[in-house]
Amino acid sequence: ARSCHSSVGSSSGWNQPISQLLRDRRLNIIDCNNHVKSAALLFGSMCAPDALNRQFNPTGDNPSTVCDLCQGTNGNTFCTNQDPYAGNIGALMCLFNQGDIAFVRHTAIIE
């Protein structure tokens, strides 16, 4: 499934859904200190803004698939919090245009 996230590290766009998938044992732990790799294996193509940021990619080897769906046009915007698909509205746009599932705040649809 192609997934769209508001950003890695955000509560509704990442922490809550990934934690639930871990609790339900639907997400295999690939690297205990890096859930991004585990999510990449489950979802395949994603737009997970900030997934390549040093904070969430400490060893520099997160797979490029975590940004496959992102739309930024350069290094300053691509797969960052400045990506057109970043944030709640951005993740919904990602879903509308090419994703299968989006993880956003519950109020995002009415915003």
Image: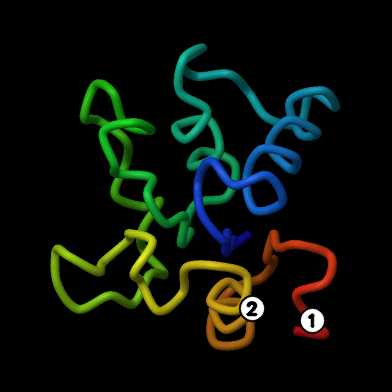
Relative image position of residue 92 (x, y in whole percent): 64, 78
Residue nearest the observer in this picture, 21 or 92:
92
Considering only vertical position in the picture, is 31 above or below 7?
Answer: above
**Residue 62 placement, left or right of 99:** left
**Which residue is found at the position 32% from the left and 41% from the top?**
63
Mark 2: which secondary structure? helix
| Residues packed near mark 1 inside 10 Å, few (<14), some (14 to 19) or many (20 plus) | few
**Residue 76 placement, left or right of 39:** left
Q: Quadrant of residue 57?
A: top left
**Which residue is found at the position 17% from the left and 65% from the top?**
76
**Which residue is found at the position 47% from the left and 68% from the top?**
86
Q: Quadrant of residue 17?
A: top right
Mark 1: which secondary structure? helix
Relative image position of residue 46 (x, y in whole percent): 48, 59
The amino acid beneath tag 2 is Leu
The residue singled out by tag 2 in the image is 92
Relative image position of residue 78 (x, y in whole percent): 26, 66
- Which quadrant is home to the C terminus? bottom right
- Which quadrant is home to the N terminus? bottom right
Q: Badges 1 and 2: C-beta atoms under 8 Å apart?
A: yes
Residue depth check, mark 1 versus mark 2: number of the one nearer the observer = 1
The residue singled out by tag 1 in the image is 109
CA gap between label 1 and label 2 equals 8 Å
Relative image position of residue 87 (x, y in whole percent): 54, 67
First-in-chain label (1 vs 2):
2
| Residues packed near mark 2 inside 10 Å, few (<14), some (14 to 19) or many (20 plus) | many
**Which residue is found at the position 14% from the left and 63% from the top?**
75
